[in-house]
Amino acid sequence: SEQSIKGISFDAEACKVLVGCVDFLDRPVMGFVRLVNSQNLDDFAESNIKVRFIFVLLGPRNENIDYIEIGRCIGTLMTNKEFHECAYQANDRRDLIEGISYFTNKSLCLVLPLGEFDSDLVNPIVEWMRDKMKHKLKKLLAESMKHNEDKSHISPLQNRYKKSISLSKDPKNKIESEHLNAVSKIQSNHLDYDQDMDEKNDEEFDPFRRTGRPFGSLILEIKYRYSKYWSDFKDALNIHCLIAFVFLFTVCIASALSFGGILADKTTKRFGVSEMLIATSMNGIIFGLFSGQPLMILGPTGPFLVFEEMLYQFCRKVVCLDFLAIRCWVAAWVLLFAVVMLGFETIYVIQYVTRFTEEIFAFLIATVFLLDALKKIIKIFNTDPLYVTEKYCTLDNTFWEKSMHNITEKECIFTREENEFIARSEPRLPSPNVALLSLILMIGTFAIAICLKKLRRSIFLGARARRTLSDVGMLISIILMVAVDNLINSKTGLNTQKLDFPNDTLGPTEYRDQWLVIPWNKNLPIWVPLAAFVPALLIFIVLFFELELTGMILYAKHRKLKKGTGFHLDLLILAILMNVNSFFGLPWMCSAPVRTLAHWASLTVYSKAYIPGEKPKLIDVKEQRLTNICVHLAIGLCLLAKSVLKMIPVSVLFGIFLYFGFVSLSGTQLFERIKLIFTPSKYCPNVIYARGVRPSKRNIYTFIQIFFVLILLLIKSLDMISSAFPIVFVILVPIRLFLVPKLFTHKELEQLDNHNEMMGDFESTLDFYELTHLPI
C-alpha cells in the first residue's frame, strides 16, 4: 500500500526472494546474490526500492518440501539485524551458514498446542527463556573469542567489532559505519565498558565527567550549551511551538493558582497568589533565557511547599522570629553550598540515587497532600459548623472574639500580630451551609479532574481529543467548579472563602507594606545568620535532588535531546533565583518534573508515515527557549485579570491538592506493591516486580519502604525537627546502596528498583504523572 511505502526509509535496500517448482531439476538448487551496489530493477519488485540482495530457490515438486515456507524463512532472516549485517560482509557460503546458526542460537522457540492462551501466563515463560538465552549467548561468545586465536578464517560475526571501528575511520564509508556501529552495540555486550566508550562520538558531551579543575564541568557545560544559544530561538519559529505554548500555559497556570492559594493558607498570607504568580513568571523568564536545559519548567512544587510550611511553623512557634528575614539568610547559605558543590564537581553523586529513594520521597509528599486537603476541609467545618438554624440565630459577636484568644502562650507576639491581622481581614460570624458547599466544591473538582485523567485510556472520542482533555483536566475542573460556586452564590447568597489579592495589582499581600525584605533588621538576633546554615543545608538537599533527578529524566536517551544538559548551570541559576526571591519576599521555585515532561511531550514530533500496525516513531524534539519564556510571561500577565481570579474558591484549589496527592500516590510502584500484598498471586498483573520476584521478598522490600515513609511522617509531625526530613532522604541513598543488597539478590533488585519498566507505550497510554515517580 501507499502508506506502507511512505513508512520505508529513503535509503532502504530490498531483498528479493524468488521460489518455485520446476520439472527439469532432480534436487533443490538455491543461490544467494549480493550486488556490489543496489540497483533499480524494472518490474522486478512490487515497489521502486533499490534491490541489493536476490535469493533464488528452485526445485522439483515434492510433498515433503514447502518452498514457500523456506522463502518466508529467508525473509525473516533478512529482517534480523545480526544476520542482516552478516549478509553485507559475508565472503563465502560458510559465513552465511554461520550467520544462520547464530540466528537460530539466539532465537526463542516456544512451541504451544493449538488454542487460546492468556498472555499473562505465557509472558513469564518467555522472560525466563530470554534469561536462559542470555547466559547461553555469553557462553557461545566466550567460546568464539577463544577460537579467534586461530586466524585462518575469521567470520563477519567474529570480527564485526573490529570492522566497525576500522570502517568508522574511513569517511567514504560513513553510512555503513554508522549502521555497523549500531549493530555492534547490540551484539557486543560481552565487551567491557572501555570498548563501549571508545565507540561513542568524541564530540558528545558527558555532563558527569570530572575535569579535575575547579568549576571545570560548569565551564565546559556553559561553553557547550551556549554554543547553540541562537538556534534555541530560531527553532521556535514554527506552529508546533505555538500549540505547545497554549497547552503548557493551561498546565502551569492551574498549578500556580493551586499552590499559591494553598501557600497563602499555610503561611497565614505571608505569601499569596499574587506573590506566587509574580515569582513563577519572573523565575520562569530568567530561567528560560539563561538555563542549560530550557525545556525544564520552574514552578511551585510539593517538597518546597512542605519545607516552606515547616520553616514558617518553626519561626512562628519555636523561635518567634521574622519568617521572611530568616529566609534571606537561608538562601544565602544555599548559594554558598551550590558554589562549593560546583567547584568540587560533585554533581555526579546524583547517579547513585535510585527509584527506592525517589518513591519514598514521592509517597511522603503525596501523603502530605492528601492529609492537608482533609485538614483544610475539617478547619472549614470548625469555622462554619453545621448548626441547626436556631443555633445560628443565637450566635453573637463574642464567638469570633473567643476564637481569636484561644492561643497558647508559646506563640508569643508573632501569633498575636497574626490574629490581629486575621481579625482585621475576616471579622465575620459562622455561616450555615458554607462548610457543606466547600466540601462539594472540593470533591467535585477532584472528581472531574480524575475522570478527565482516566479519559485518556477510555474508548470515547478520538485519541487526540482524549489526550488533550486529560492533559488540561485540572483547568477544566477549576472552571466548572467556579461556575457552580457562582451559580449557588447568585441563588442563595452563600459566600465561600475566595482567593485573596491586594488592592494594588503589583503590590504585596496586605500583611506587609513593601516588597523588599530587610534581612538585618534590629529585631533579628546576631546568631540567626549562622544558625540559618542548618535549614539551608536541608532545603539545598531538596533543591539538588529534585533539580538533578528531573534533569536525569530529560537526559534519558529515548527523549532524544541533542543540545546538551544543564546539571551544573541550572543549579547555579536556581540558587541565585532563591536569593532574589527571598529579598523580595517571594516563594521559592524549583524544577517541576510533571510540567517538565508535559513541556517535552508537547514539543515532540512523531513520524506521520509508518507501516500499518507499527507505532509512530519519535523523530525530533523542538529544543528551544521561546515556549518557556512566553508561558511564564503570560502567567505574569494574569495579574491583570485579578477580578476574575478573585472568583476562585479556596476549596476548589484544595480539590486540586487532593488530586495531586491521589495521582502522585497511585503513580508510584510502592503503592502498587502495597495493593499486591492483599492480592492473590494468580491475580497479580504481568509486571516485572510482580511476576519476577517471590511475594515474600517483594513484601519485605515494600515494608522497608513503608517503614521509612512512617519515619518521615513522624519527623514532619514534630515541629522542633519537622524541617529535618531531607536528612533522612540523604541517609536512604547509602542504605539502598550498601544495606538493602544484603537482603536481596542483584536480579531481585533489578526488577524491584527498575527505572525503565514503563518506557514502552508512552504516547498512547501513560500520562505525565505515571512517567515520573518524583513528587509533583
Image (spheres, rainbow, N blue to C red):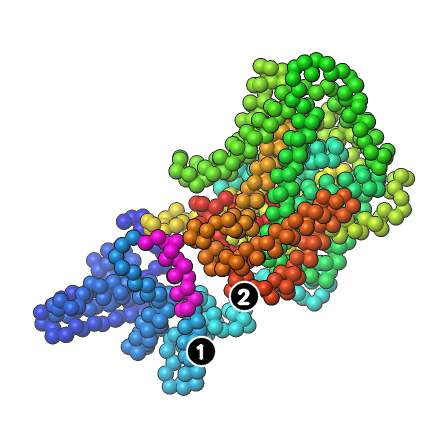
Is residue 163 something one can see in this rendering?
no
Q: Position of residue 27 (x, y in %)?
A: 14, 74
Q: Secondary structure at mark 1?
A: helix
Q: Position of residue 191 (x, y in %)?
A: 49, 73
Query: Closest to the observer: 764 or 490?
Result: 490
Tell me: 282 left or right of 183. Answer: right
Residue 72 against residue 594 in the figure, above or below: below
What is the quadrant of the C terminus in the image?
Answer: top right
As shown in the figure, which amino acid type bears the numbered disc 1?
A: Ala
Query: Closest to the observer: 693 or 244?
Result: 693
Tell me: 79 left or right of 195. Answer: left
Is residue 291 shown in magenta?
no
Q: Nearer the viewer, mark 1 or mark 2?
A: 2
- Span of residues in magenta: 117-133
Query: Closest to the observer: 758 or 564?
Result: 758
Q: Position of residue 91 (x, y in %)?
A: 32, 77
Residue 510 against residue 355 in the figure, above or below: above
Task: Look at mark 1 in the image and give the residue it sits on.
Answer: 142
Asked if the residue under mark 2 is in contact with the one under mark 1, i.e. CB atoms within 8 Å, the reply is no
Q: CA distance from mark 1 to mark 2?
A: 23 Å
Task: Look at mark 2 in the image and give the residue it sits on.
Answer: 746
Q: Secondary structure at mark 2?
A: helix
As shown in the figure, which amino acid type bears the numbered disc 2?
A: His
User: In the rendered picture of this protein, how many numbered marks are placed on residues?
Assistant: 2
Which residue is at a point 22% across and 60% down the rendered structure image? 44
Which residue is at a point 76% across and 23% down the rendered structure image? 425
Which residue is at a point 44% across and 78% down the rendered structure image? 142
